[in-house]
Amino acid sequence: MDVLRNTDGEAVYRRCAVTGHHHHLLCRSCGKAVEVEAPAVEAWAARTATEHGFTAVEHTVEIFGLCPECTARNTA
C-alpha cells in the first residue's frame, strides 16, 4: 500500500498489487492507476544522487496523463 499526500496535506492510501518498489501511471480524468517497474528511473535516481553526494536515497515517481479509455472519449 502506498501513502500519498494530497494538495491539502491529507494522507491518501492506494492499494498496490505489486509489493516491491515500483512507480505509477495515473489518469488525470478517471483516476486509473497502472503499476510499472522502471529500471531506467532507478538507474537515473542512483546516478543523480551519487553525483550530488546523497546517500540513503528514496524516491517516488508518478506519471500523470490520460488512459486509453479517457483519450478515446476525449477524441470521439
Image: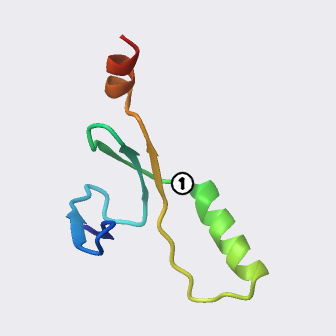
Depth order, front residue of 8/26: 8
Instruction: Give percent across and percent down for residue 6.
Output: 30, 66
Q: How is the image coloured?
A: rainbow
Q: Which residue is mark 1?
A: 38
- Residue 55 is situated, as x and y percent measured from the top left of the image, at 63, 89
The residue that appears at 49% across and 61% down in the rendered structure is: 61
Quadrant of the snapshot with the N terminus: bottom left
Farthest-out residue, top: 76
Q: In which quarter of the view is residue 20 placed?
A: bottom left
Mark 1 belongs to which amino acid? Ala
**In the image, farthest residue toward the right:** 51
Answer above or below: position of 75 versus 9: above
From the viewer's perspective, is residue 21 above or below residue 28?
below
**Residue drawn at (26%, 38%), measured in percent from left and top?**
30
Give the residue displayed 35% in from the left and 41% down from the top. Answer: 27
State which quadrant residue 21 falls in: bottom left
* Left or right: 47 as drawn, with respect to 2: right
Q: Disc 1 on helix, strand or loop?
A: loop
Judge the density around disc 1: few (<14), some (14-19), many (≥20) Cα neighbours within 10 Å. Answer: few
| Quarter of the picture holding the C terminus | top left
Residue 9 in the image: state x and y as whole percent: 30, 75
Q: Is residue 5 left or right of residue 24?
A: left
State the residue in front, 32 or 36.
32
Q: How many marks?
A: 1
Which picture quadrant has residue 66? Answer: top left
Residue 7, x across and y down, in percent: 33, 66
Rendered view: 54 above or below 4: below
Identity of the residue furthest to the front in this view? 8
